[in-house]
Amino acid sequence: MSLPTVLEVLPGTPAHRAGIVAGDELVSVNGVVPNDVIEYQQLVDDVDPVFLVQREGTALPVTIVKPEGAPIGLRLGSSIFDRVQTCDNHCEFCFIYQLPPGLRKSLYLKDDDYRLSFLYGNFTTLTRFTELDLSRVIDERLGPLYVSIHATDPDVRAEMLRNRRGATSLRWLEALLEGGITVHGQVVLCPGINNGAILERTLAEVITRFPRLETLGIVPLGLSRYNTEPNLRVHTPREAADDLEIVHFWQGRALDALGRRVFQASDELYVQAGIAVPPADHYEAFAQHENGIGMVRAFYDELDRLEGGTRSTMPIVTGEWRSVPAAPAEGYRATRHLQGDPTPGEGPIVVLTGTYGVSVLGPVKERLERLTERRIRLMEVPNDFFGGNTAVAGLMVGRDIITRIAADTEPVGAYVIPDVALSGDMFIDDTPLSDVTDSARAPVVVAPATASGLLGAIR
């Protein structure tokens, strides 16, 4: 077990007044050695918690004077202090197996830790879940959790996970739901493996076996050119349309039986099928917005509101603890860099996005131009780095953007990049944002991937 390190002490806070400094290592709180930031947060909510910190090899007791429940003012360097529960599945569709070699080590870490599911919305298969884990989750009300289901047929699920425990681990899902824990599920839809009739069975059994499941997201398989699995392939437009028909049918059955649609297909599946995304009520509370489900509808509806002069609102992002000050940014929840406010030139504003992004923004480009009173060019950035069907904006890489910008000879006032392509100041291929800005012949703006964020950047 490694000691968590204090990364930041906010000025004027109880921790700052008590003398805690960045670089201190946390040994215990009130005599308890916390295993993770969840336990830590519960301990520091007490009145006047007593810290034991290690500073340059010396153990120092520090009493932090504060009322019960008041923020303490620390940000730690990790959220799991003992050891992240790694994944023992070998799913043939896992995108980690489809990464090229040489990227930063954190991208190759397969976690299956319910704590990261609670903190950041990571999906867990529950194949390493235990009675002790269940007891803690229920006792401490650690929800919502996010569970990868893929198929309810035991044999199909075990084969997909390449783990015999995949056939039985959904019993933990049932126990969590019976314990009153909110759970959102996911199916990664692989043509010829768990779509079609298997998908039908999965959706039917969710209604009967797991009626308390809050939502079930159905997302299509993503393939990179590094895939080595011969059984994997992407949806054809006809297959995507057929699977959407299944989802829509069972949405109706769930609405009749449970009063909720439960089943929600990803935007990518609609794009693959060439079918318009449904209205907002199909996504209910947009609970899987960050899983690529309902983003297009939320964008279009936000644009409608902006045109009508009403206040813009967006779905609340998933992961209840993402705002906990002590929890560091990890994975796709890392703070995304918003490039300052450079002054654009006289040319058109060029919005760089993936292939799917162009198909989404194309139909509303003229509306964006009217609202901003600026000319706009949509620049598709083919994903040569990953290849395959990786056409979403969130997987755009820095070197592909640099190549695309270098080939651009048309007038440009500024380039706009969606923030979902960045984690901090880095693209997924470890290209820093500064390399892109240095290579561009016009200002580069990083904007939130919302209608108001894009409009603000264009203006």
Image: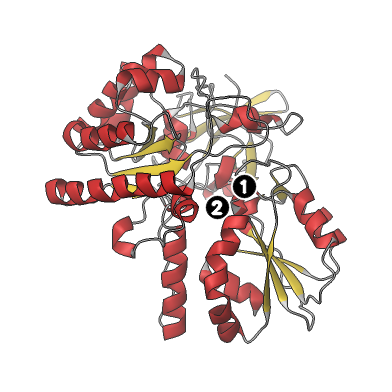
Residue pushed farthest top?
164
In the rendered image, is residue 11 in sight?
A: no
Using the rendered view, name the quadrant where residue 336 is placed.
bottom right
Q: In the picture provided, is 328 more to the left or to the right than 207?
A: right
What is the secondary structure assignment of the residue under circle 1? strand
Q: Identify the mark at residue 9; answer none if there is no mark.
A: 1
Q: Amino acid at mark 2?
A: Thr
Q: Position of residue 168 (x, y in %)?
A: 31, 17
Q: Position of residue 203 (x, y in %)?
A: 26, 38
User: Observer-nearest residue: 186 or 130?
Assistant: 186
What is the secondary structure assignment of the residue under circle 2? loop
Label 1 to label 2, Cα distance in Å? 8 Å
Q: Are marks 1 and 2 in contact (CB under 8 Å)?
A: yes
| Residue beneath disc 2 | 13
In the rendered image, is residue 419 in sight?
A: yes
Q: Amino acid at mark 1?
A: Val
